[in-house]
Image: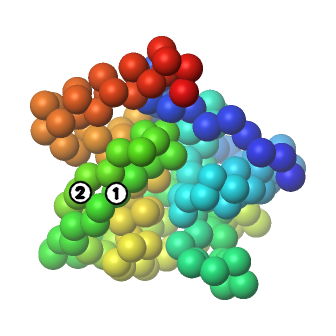
């Protein structure tokens, strides 16, 4: 497994819509493993393919706190088929928006349909943190970052700071 470079905002590739995967082949299995390695190293609890410059509908997620409890999820073409009526707010961060955090409100629970690494359709119902992470990662596939859920004032302030740290070479 190898570690991939994570794109940071502002980057036009993070704003694009990713395309559906027709079939998960060996190349995409390797990509999923590399994304997991990159995510664990960061460290993070979710990563979407466009964050490593691949505009395909693939996400990986693992919300385990300890290495011993790892339970990686590899998903292609994830789509939300049900959301709960009630919401949850979490302080979100993103490996593509380093060092910035903000509270985002999303449905508390979701059911997600996806293509698994064995090319079989699967469904997962999640609530709490996992539901938030899944929605956050799926947003990436449509070019949406968590800061897009904030006021434009707050978003632009964060983007300006990110741009400045890029210029400063950090
Ligand atoms: Ni993110």
Residue highlighted by disc 1: 92
| 14 relative to 127 in the view: left or right | right
User: Percent from the top left, x then y, of residue 71?
Assistant: 66, 78
Dot 2 or dot 1, earlier in sequence: 1
* Residue 167 sits above or below residue 170 on the image: above
- State if disc 1 and disc 2 touch (CB < 8 Å): yes
| 125 relative to 76 in the view: left or right | left
In the image, which disc is placed on residue 104?
A: 2
Relative depth, front residue between 17 and 6: 6
What residue appears at the point 29 percent right and 41 percent down from the top-left corner?
A: 147
Relative depth, front residue between 135 and 103: 103
Question: What count of labels does the image hold?
Answer: 2
What residue appears at the point 34 percent right and 78 percent down from the top-left corner?
A: 128
User: Would the CB of label 1 be found within 8 Å of ligand 1?
Assistant: yes
What residue appears at the point 35 percent right and 45 percent down from the top-left corner?
A: 100
Q: Quadrant of the C terminus?
A: top right
């Amino acid at each position: 497994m190898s570690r991939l470079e994570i794109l940071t905002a502002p980057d036009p590739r993070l704003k694009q819509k990713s395309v559906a995967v027709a079939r998960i082949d060996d190349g995409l299995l390797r990509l999923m493993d590399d994304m997991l390695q990159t995510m664990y190293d960061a460290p993070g609890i979710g990563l979407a393919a466009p964050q490593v410059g691949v505009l395909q509908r693939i996400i990986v997620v693992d919300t385990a706190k300890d290495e011993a409890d790892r339970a990686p999820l590899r998903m292609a073409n994830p789509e939300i088929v049900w959301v709960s009526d009630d919401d949850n707010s979490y302080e979100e961060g993103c490996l593509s928006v380093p060092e910035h955090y903000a509270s985002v409100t999303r449905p508390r629970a979701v059911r997600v349909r996806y293509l698994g690494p064995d090319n079989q359709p699967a469904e997962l119902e999640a609530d709490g943190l996992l539901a938030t992470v899944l929605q956050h990662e799926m947003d990436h596939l449509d070019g949406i970052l968590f800061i897009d859920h904030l006021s434009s004032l707050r978003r632009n302030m964060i983007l300006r700071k990110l741009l400045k740290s890029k210029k400063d070479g950090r």
